[in-house]
Image: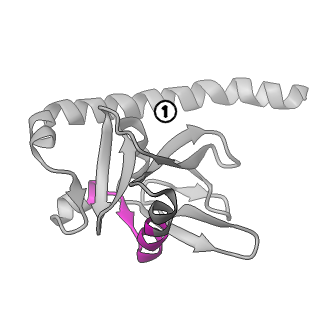
């Protein structure tokens, strides 16, 4: 256990600094264009190319699976994507179903299905594509492409920036 604690103590300041820098960068860009962000409706995949870079996209499989889940639940749920420190590559994707939207959330919609990403996590997934994949060992939502990530694990549940 001791070698892991030593490694964690060395990596925590690095990741904390990167998260803080990205958060400050996101805040400065948000403040510069805050009036434009608040006046626009939630981003959709049919908007211009510049907004497409900021958007998080959903595949047909993702939309279809969310519709199935909503029909099972009996009420409209949103797919929430958040980023957490951890995983085998440094950061990991976390998917959950949610029925609430927070003040700092961005909502991306396709064919009536909503994907919610909080402000800090959005900095890590701008331009990414969310898919639903069924394999022999698991069925899950996953980020199939992420232009921000420079690497990741083979199961696509964690990534490096």
Q: Is mark 1 on a helix, strand or loop?
A: helix
Q: In front here: 54 or 138?
A: 138
Residue 33 screen position, x and y as percent: 14, 37
Look at the image and name its color scheme.
Answer: one colour
Name which residue lies at 61% across and 63% down: 140
Q: Which of 57 and 20 is in front in this view?
A: 57
Give the magenta range: 53-67
Relative side of 39 to 78, left or right: left
Which residue does the image show at 34% across and 39% down from the upper left? 101
Pointer 1: residues within 10 angstroms few (<14), some, or many (20+)?
Answer: few
Identify residue for label 1.
Answer: 18
Q: Is residue 5 visible?
A: yes
* Image point (21%, 51%), residue name: 42
Asked if the magenta segment contains residue 57, the reply would be yes
Residue 123 in sight here: no
Q: Image quarter for residue 138?
A: bottom right
- Magenta stretch secondary structure, dominant: helix
* Quadrant of the drawing holding the N terminus: top right
State the residue at coordinates (38%, 39%). Answer: 100
């Amino acid at each position: 256990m001791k070698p892991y604690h030593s490694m964690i103590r060395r990596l925590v300041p690095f990741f904390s600094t990167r998260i803080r820098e990205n958060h400050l960068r996101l805040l400065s860009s948000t403040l510069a264009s805050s009036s434009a962000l608040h006046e626009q409706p939630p981003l959709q995949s049919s908007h211009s190319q510049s907004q497409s870079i900021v958007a998080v996209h959903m595949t047909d499989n993702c939309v279809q699976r969310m519709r199935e889940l909503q029909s099972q639940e009996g009420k409209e749920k949103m797919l929430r994507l958040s980023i957490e420190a951890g995983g085998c590559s440094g950061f990991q994707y976390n998917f959950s179903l949610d029925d609430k939207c927070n003040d700092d959330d961005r909502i991306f919609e396709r064919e009536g299905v909503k994907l919610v990403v909080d402000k800090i996590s959005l900095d890590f997934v701008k331009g990414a594509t969310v898919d639903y994949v069924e394999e022999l060992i698991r069925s899950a939502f996953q980020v199939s492409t992420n232009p921000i990530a420079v690497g990741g694990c083979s199961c696509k549940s964690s990534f490096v920036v």
